[in-house]
Image (tube, rainbow, N blue to C red):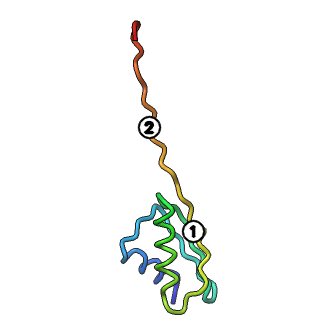
Amino acid sequence: MKASALSVHVQSLNLPFKTLTVVLQNEKVTLKGEVDNQSDAEKIALAVVNVEGVSPVDNQIEVVVKQSESKYLTVVEGD
């Protein structure tokens, strides 16, 4: 199994991620990248660990919290 094949496997499952890097050394896989929530990071790790010949998985995927845009209000005298 190659790292590129694992990346294609994750993409084929339509698992959401912003960025994803898969590093394979012997049978150990390291996952790096960014997702919107912890659940997505765990689903990606689970999808990879369930591939035959992969063990263990070091999940270093970071959860990136979206910052909402600042809202500006106009203060009018008397408010």
Q: Position of residue 49 (x, y in %)?
A: 52, 83
Amino acid at pointer 1: Lys
Question: Secondary structure under badge 2?
Answer: loop
Mark 1 nearby-residue class (10 Å; few <14, some 14–19, many ≥20): some
Number of marks in the rendered image:
2
Q: Position of residue 22 (x, y in %)?
A: 54, 75
Q: Which residue is mark 2?
A: 69
76, 7: nearer the viewer: 76
User: Residue sitting at 51 percent across and 51 percent down?
Assistant: 65
Tell me if residue 8 comes above or below residue 34 in the rendering: below
Identity of the residue furthest to the top in this view = 77
Query: Which comes sooner in the sequence, label 2 or label 1?
Result: 1
Q: Which residue is mark 1?
A: 32
Real-space Cα distance between discs 2 and 1?
27 Å
Left or right of residue 45, residue 74 in this image = left
User: Residue sitting at 48 percent across and 85 percent down?
Assistant: 50
On the rendered image, what quadrant is the C terminus found in?
top left
Question: Secondary structure under badge 1?
Answer: strand
Amino acid at pointer 2: Glu
User: Residue sitting at 50 percent across and 67 percent down?
Assistant: 41
Left or right of residue 32, residue 4 in this image = left
